[in-house]
Amino acid sequence: MIAWGYLLVAICLEVVGTVSLKFSNGFSDWRFTVLSLTVYGLSFWSLSLCLRVIPISVAYAVWSGLGTAAVAIIGIMFFKEPMTALKGVFLLMIIGGVAGLKTISNNG
């Protein structure tokens, strides 16, 4: 179960890194640039720890899928990005796919 904890930490760090990229203004703000690079590095480190137990096909799909969904939701909520019915359907499909992968995984 700890492997899934590492994966959750990796996802959270990846989301922070991606949001920090927006604030880095094309790497022109050094504070957010350093924050982005640091948390991305920590995210990969945490992802590598979960790969000791969770198969890479499942771990990477969950990491990228939940990270993508989280960043999309943050974009809608905080950056006033448009929300359409299709966007909602596809976000639910990503989350459903991740839940399915977790359900069928025997590891962690």
Image: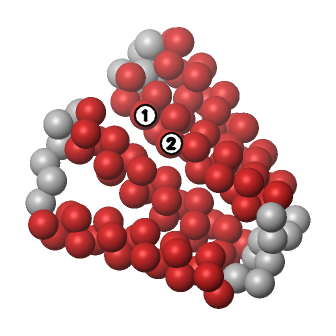
Question: Residue 15's mark?
Answer: 2
Q: Does residue 59 appear to the left or right of 33 in the view shown? A: right
Amino acid at dot 1: Val
Residue farthest right in this picture: 52
Q: Does residue 61 appear to the left or right of 94 in the view shown? A: right
Q: Does residue 101 appear to the left or right of 96 in the view shown? A: right
Which of the two residues, 5 or 71, is positioned nearer the viewer here?
Answer: 5
Which of the two residues, 100 or 41, is positioned nearer the viewer here?
Answer: 100
Looking at the image, do the residues carrying marks 2 and 1 touch, with CB atoms under 8 Å apart?
yes
Q: How is the image coloured?
A: secondary structure
**What residue lies at 56% left-to-right and 29% top-to-bottom?**
36
Image quarter in which the N terminus is found: bottom right
Image quarter in which the C terminus is found: bottom right
**Image spot of residue 61 (x, y percent):** 57, 70
Amino acid at dot 2: Val
The residue that mark 1 highlights is 19
Displayed quadrant of residue 62: bottom right
Q: Does residue 106 appear to the left or right of 15 in the view shown? A: right
**What residue lies at 60% left-to-right and 20% top-to-bottom?**
34
- Element class at badge 1: helix
Crowd tier of the residue under label 1, counting other residues whose Cα lies within 10 Å: few below 14, some 14–19, many 20 or above: some
**What residue lies at 80% left-to-right and 77% top-to-bottom?**
107
> Gap between marks 2 and 1, in whole Å?
6 Å
**What residue lies at 22% left-to-right and 65% top-to-bottom?**
88
Question: Residue 63's mark?
Answer: none
Report the label total: 2
**Image spot of residue 20 (x, y percent):** 46, 28
Residue 43, above or below 47: above
Displayed quadrant of residue 105: bottom right
**Image spot of residue 103 (x, y percent):** 62, 82
- Element class at badge 2: helix
